[in-house]
Amino acid sequence: MKKCAICGKTYIQSITRKKLRGKYNPTQKKKKYPNLQWVRIPSDVKLKKYKRFAGKRVLACTKCIKRLTKGE
């Protein structure tokens, strides 16, 4: 599933609207997915949020990966 294992971030749904003769015409619904990457969490992780994933390889969003590298 396209879901971050750490924070649980999933898709958001966006609706594009086109203006046609002064009125908005709803055209289509799109799902925007988070940028997920495979990352190996180190076994000596210090952050509490990542402790249960220590030493495992998980799908994480880029925001969680950035937070992981800054916490060390």
Image (cartoon, rainbow, N blue to C red):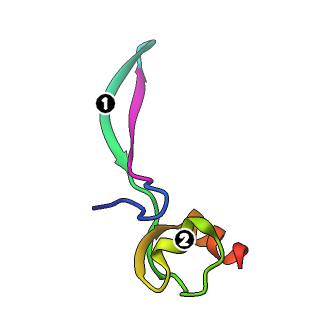
Q: Residue sitting at 41 percent across and 14 percent down? A: 21
* Residue lying at the far top of the rendered structure: 22
SS of the residue at dot 2? helix
Task: Please name the amino acid that badge 2 sits on.
Answer: Tyr
19 and 70: which one is in front? 70
Q: Quadrant of the C terminus?
A: bottom right
Main SS class of the magenta portion in the image: strand
SS of the residue at dot 1? strand
- The Cα–Cα distance between marks 2 and 1, rounded to whole angstroms, is 41 Å
Residue 65 x, y percent position in the rendering? 57, 72
Residue 69 x, y percent position in the rendering? 66, 77
Q: Residue sitting at 37 percent across and 59 percent down? A: 3
- Does 21 sit left or right of 45 as displayed? left
Task: State which region is magenta.
Answer: 9-19
Indicate yes or no whether the magenta region holds residue 57. Answer: no
**In the rendered image of this protein, does residue 27 appear above or below residue 23?**
below
Indicate yes or no whether the magenta region holds residue 15. Answer: yes
- Does 45 sit left or right of 26 as displayed? right
Residue 57 x, y percent position in the rendering? 41, 82
Q: How many marks?
A: 2
CB contact under 8 Å: marks 2 and 1: no
| Mark 2 or 1, nearer chain start | 1
The image quadrant that residue 71 belongs to is: bottom right
Q: Quadrant of the N terminus?
A: bottom left
Q: Which mark is residue 69?
A: none
Task: Please name the amino acid that badge 1 sits on.
Answer: Thr
Residue 53 x, y percent position in the rendering? 46, 75
Residue marked by disc 2: 50
Q: Residue sitting at 39 percent across and 52 percent down? A: 10
Residue marked by disc 1: 27
Q: Residue sitting at 49 percent across and 57 percent down? A: 7
Categorize mark 2 by other alpha carbons within 10 Å: few (<14), some (14-19), many (20+): some
